[in-house]
Image (cartoon, rainbow, N blue to C red):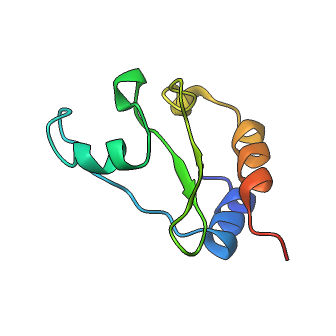
Amino acid sequence: MHKPELARLLARDFVVVMIDVGRYDKNLDIAQEYGVPISKGIPAMSVLDPHGKLLYAQSQGQFANARAMPYQDFNVFFEKWKPKR
């Protein structure tokens, strides 16, 4: 996610919150609250609207292989969930 285009999209349309789960022994309540099964792998993502309503929670570890995922996959994902203007 270090591509400038993606960084601009994230900065403009999203608030990224990183949550430290340690060795799966910290902040697990947050993952549970938003329906993210971190046992399927991390990193994991959820998308909330500006009011905190859950719009999307990965269900199958879709981003567990994030380091090897092509930029286009991230771009498609974030374009889909960016706020409508």
Q: Quadrant of residue 68?
A: top right
Left or right, 2 with respect to 38, comes to: right
Q: Position of residue 71 (x, y in %)?
A: 71, 41
Residue drawn at x 21%, y 49% as measured from the top left? 27
Total residue callouts: 0
- Indicate left or right for 42 with 48 as reference: left
Residue 9 lies in what quarter of the image? bottom right
Q: Name the spot of residue 72 as percent of width and height, x first.
A: 78, 40
Q: Nearer the viewer, residue 79 or 53?
A: 53
Left or right of 69, for residue 22: left
Residue at the spot 19% in from the left edge and 41% down from the top edge: 22
The one nearer the camera, 31 or 67, is 31
The foreground one among 67 and 74 is: 74
Residue appearing at x 79%, y 55% in the figure = 79
Asked which quadrant contains residue 50, the reply is bottom right
Where is 34 relative to 7, above or below?
above
Residue 12 in the image: state x and y as whole percent: 68, 75
Residue pushed farthest left? 25
Rendered residue at 53%/69% (across/down): 15
- Image quarter (top left, top right, bottom left or bottom right) of the C terminus: bottom right
**Residue 42 position (above or below residue 7):** above
Image coordinates for residue 19, horizontal then vertical, percent: 32, 53
Q: Nearer the viewer, residue 39 or 51?
A: 51
Indicate whether 29 appears above or below 13.
above
